[in-house]
Amino acid sequence: MDINELLAREQVSLMCAANARHGAARDAHLGLAELYAGRVRKLAGRLKAANKVAAGCTPLTREHIALFVPGSRDGYGRA
């Protein structure tokens, strides 16, 4: 599940909790919302760590791209 799906499910759980008629249902929906919020925090932390790694990488140049495009000197399939 990506972060958008997790955020959407958390929001739905919160709305269901707000509209619940019984305390047990409210508690169940709040529990789900907390579960999704935890997953969002975990995924956000992993994405933040991945961004830090990517920030330290060397940007691709046309020469790098040309290595993966056969017969190309400029990296865009043109000789």
Image (spheres, rainbow, N blue to C red):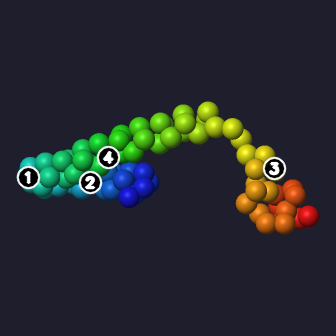
Q: Position of residue 53 (x, y in %)?
A: 55, 36
Say whether marks 3 and 2 touch (CB < 8 Å): no
Residue 72: quarter of image: bottom right
- Badge 1 amino acid: Ala
Tell me the residue at 42%/55% (across/down): 2
Alpha carbon separation for disc pair 4 and 1: 23 Å
Tell me the residue at 73%/46% (across/down): 60
Which residue, given by chain and number where applicable, does mark 2 sit on?
A: 13
Please state which of residues 69 and 41 is positioned toward the viewer in this rendering: 69
Q: Mark 4: few, some, or many residues within 10 Å (few <14, many ≥20)?
A: some
Alpha carbon separation for disc pair 3 and 2: 49 Å
Tag 2 or tag 1, which sits nearer the N-term? 2
In the drawing, does residue 62 fall left or right of residue 43?
right
Please state which of residues 65 and 40 is positioned toward the viewer in this rendering: 65
Which residue, given by chain and number where applicable, does mark 4 sit on?
A: 39
Which residue, given by chain and number where applicable, does mark 1 sit on?
A: 24
Tag 4 or tag 3, which sits nearer the N-term? 4
Alpha carbon separation for disc pair 2 and 4: 14 Å
- Secondary structure under tag 3 reads helix
Tell me the residue at 50%/40% (across/down): 50
Judge depth for marks 4 and 1 and give the one in front: 4
On residue 7, the disc is none
